[in-house]
Image: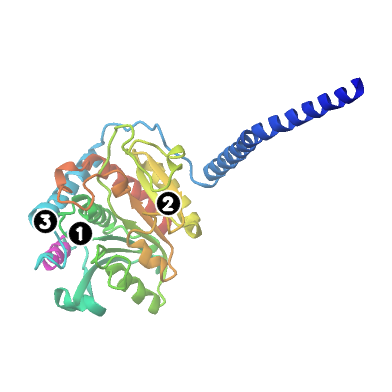
C-alpha cells in the first residue's frame, strides 16, 4: 500500500512539473524571440552606423558670415520672384512655365552664361498639355582639363498644382543659380552643367515626360560621360523644435536626428562612393548639420526627384534635400510660401555645395 501511494505521488509531481513548464513555455519563447530581435536590431543599427557617413548631430550653427548674408539676400529675391511674382508654375496655369523660362534665361545670362533651351516633345496623353512641348534650361562651363567628363547640377522649376512652390522647388532653383554664379568664370577640371528641369511634379512625376528624363535620355543616347548628377529639391525649410523631423521608415529616427535643422544627402546603395565624397566635401566648409543615407529606391522619398531619371539611364545620382514632406507641413499645399523659408540656412547649404562641386569636378 505504501509503495503504491508513493508511486502515485511521484506521478502527480511529474504531471504538475509538466503543467508548469507548459504554462511558462510561451513566455520563455517570447523572451528568447525578443532577445534575438533586439540583438538583430542593434547589430543592424551598428552596421548602418559603420557603413553610412558619420552624423553631425548636435553641431552648433554659428552666426552667418558676410558671404552667407549676401547669398541669403539673393536667394530670398529669387524665391520670392518665382513663388510670389509668378506663383504656381505648371502646365495647368497658362503662361507660367514660359514666364519662368524667360526669367531663368535672364538670370543665367546675368551670372555670365549663354544658356540654351532643350525643347522636348511630351508623349502619350501628355501631348495635350502646354502645346505638347516642354523646355529645360542649360548653362554650362567647360572643364579646362577633362571637358568630356560632366557633372550635372539640376533642379526642377515647376510647382505642383495648387501650390506656389516656394520650398518645392523655388528654393532648389535659387540655390542652382547661386552655385552657377559662383563658378561663372571659374572653370574646374571637369565640365559643369547647371540645368533647370521642367515637369518634375505630377502628372509627369517618374514618367518619360519629366524634363530630367528627357535630358538624361538624350545624354545617354549621345554617350555623354556624366560621372555624377546632383538634384536640388527642397532646400529651405528648417526647424529647431524637437520632434520636427519625421522619417519614412520606423526605426530610422533612432539613427538620425529628431530635429529638422540639417540638410540631407540621399542616394541608392550603388552610389555610396558618391555619397561619401559629397558628404565629406560638404563638411569642409558648411556651417550647417548634414546627414547622409543610402536607401533602397522603394523607400518613400529616396527616389522622389530628378536624380531618379539619371538612375534610369545608368548615371550616378544624388539628392540634396531638407526631406520635404518629412518635416514641412506645407509640402504640396497653397501654404508653401516664401516667408516660411530660412534663407540663412539656405546660404549655408550653398557654401557647402560649392565645396562638393569643387571636389567632384577635380
Give the vertical position of 247 relative to 298 (above or below): above
The CA distance from mark 1 to mark 2 is 29 Å
> Circles 3 and 1: CB distance less than 8 Å?
no
Nearer to the camera, 310 or 46: 46
Characterize the local packing of mark 3: few (<14), some (14-19) or many (20 or more) Cα atoms within 10 angstroms: many
Q: Position of residue 13 (x, y in %)?
A: 78, 26
Q: Position of residue 52 (x, y in %)?
A: 50, 46
Q: Which residue is mark 2?
A: 278
The CA distance from mark 2 to mark 3 is 32 Å
Q: Residue at x 26, y 79 (%)?
A: 124
* Label 1 vs 2, first from the N-terminus: 1
The quadrant of the picture occupied by the N terminus is: top right
Q: Which residue is mark 3?
A: 87
**In the image, is residue 102 part of the stretch drawn in magenta?**
yes
Give the number of the mark in front: 2 or 3: 3
Q: Residue at x 11, y 53 (%)?
A: 81
Kindly indicate the quadrant of the structure image that contains residue 205: bottom left
The CA distance from mark 3 to mark 1 is 11 Å
Amino acid at each position: 500500500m505504501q509503495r503504491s501511494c508513493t508511486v502515485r505521488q511521484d506521478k502527480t509531481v511529474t504531471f504538475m512539473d509538466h503543467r508548469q513548464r507548459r504554462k511558462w513555455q510561451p513566455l520563455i519563447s517570447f523572451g528568447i524571440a525578443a532577445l534575438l530581435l533586439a540583438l538583430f536590431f542593434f547589430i543592424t543599427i551598428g552596421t548602418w552606423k559603420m557603413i553610412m557617413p558619420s552624423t553631425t548631430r548636435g553641431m552648433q550653427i554659428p552666426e552667418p558670415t558676410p558671404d552667407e548674408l549676401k547669398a541669403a539676400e539673393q536667394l530670398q529675391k529669387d524665391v520670392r520672384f518665382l513663388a510670389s511674382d509668378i506663383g504656381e508654375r505648371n502646365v495647368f496655369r497658362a503662361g507660367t512655365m514660359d514666364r519662368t523660362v524667360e526669367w531663368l534665361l535672364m538670370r543665367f545670362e546675368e551670372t555670365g552664361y549663354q544658356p540654351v533651351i532643350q525643347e522636348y516633345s511630351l508623349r502619350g496623353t501628355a501631348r495635350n498639355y502646354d502645346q505638347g512641348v516642354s523646355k529645360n534650361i542649360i548653362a554650362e562651363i567647360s572643364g579646362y582639363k577633362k571637358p568630356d567628363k560632366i557633372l550635372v547640377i539640376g533642379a526642377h522649376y515647376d510647382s505642383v498644382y495648387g501650390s506656389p512652390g516656394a520650398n518645392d522647388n523655388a528654393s532648389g532653383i535659387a540655390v542652382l543659380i547661386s552655385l552657377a554664379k559662383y563658378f561663372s568664370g571659374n572653370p574646374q577640371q571637369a565640365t559643369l552643367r547647371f540645368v533647370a528641369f521642367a515637369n518634375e511634379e505630377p502628372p509627369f512625376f517618374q514618367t518619360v515626360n519629366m524634363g530630367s528624363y528627357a535630358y538624361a535620355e538624350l545624354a545617354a543616347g549621345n554617350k555623354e560621360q556624366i560621372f555624377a548628377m546632383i538634384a536640388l529639391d527642397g532646400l529651405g525649410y528648417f526647424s529647431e523644435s524637437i520632434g520636427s523631423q519625421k522619417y519614412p521608415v520606423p526605426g530610422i529616427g533612432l539613427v538620425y536626428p529628431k530635429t529638422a535643422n540639417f540638410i540631407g544627402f540621399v542616394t541608392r546603395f550603388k552610389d555610396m562612393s558618391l555619397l561619401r565624397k559629397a558628404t565629406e566635401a560638404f563638411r569642409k566648409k558648411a556651417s550647417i548639420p548634414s546627414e547622409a543615407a543610402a536607401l533602397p529606391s522603394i523607400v518613400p522619398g529616396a527616389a522622389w526627384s530628378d536624380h531618379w531619371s539619371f538612375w534610369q539611364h545608368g548615371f550616378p545620382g544624388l539628392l540634396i534635400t531638407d526631406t520635404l514632406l518629412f518635416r514641412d507641413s506645407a509640402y504640396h499645399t497653397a501654404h508653401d510660401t516664401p516667408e516660411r523659408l530660412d534663407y540663412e540656412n539656405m546660404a549655408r547649404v550653398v557654401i557647402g555645395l560649392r565645396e562638393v562641386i569643387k571636389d567632384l569636378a577635380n
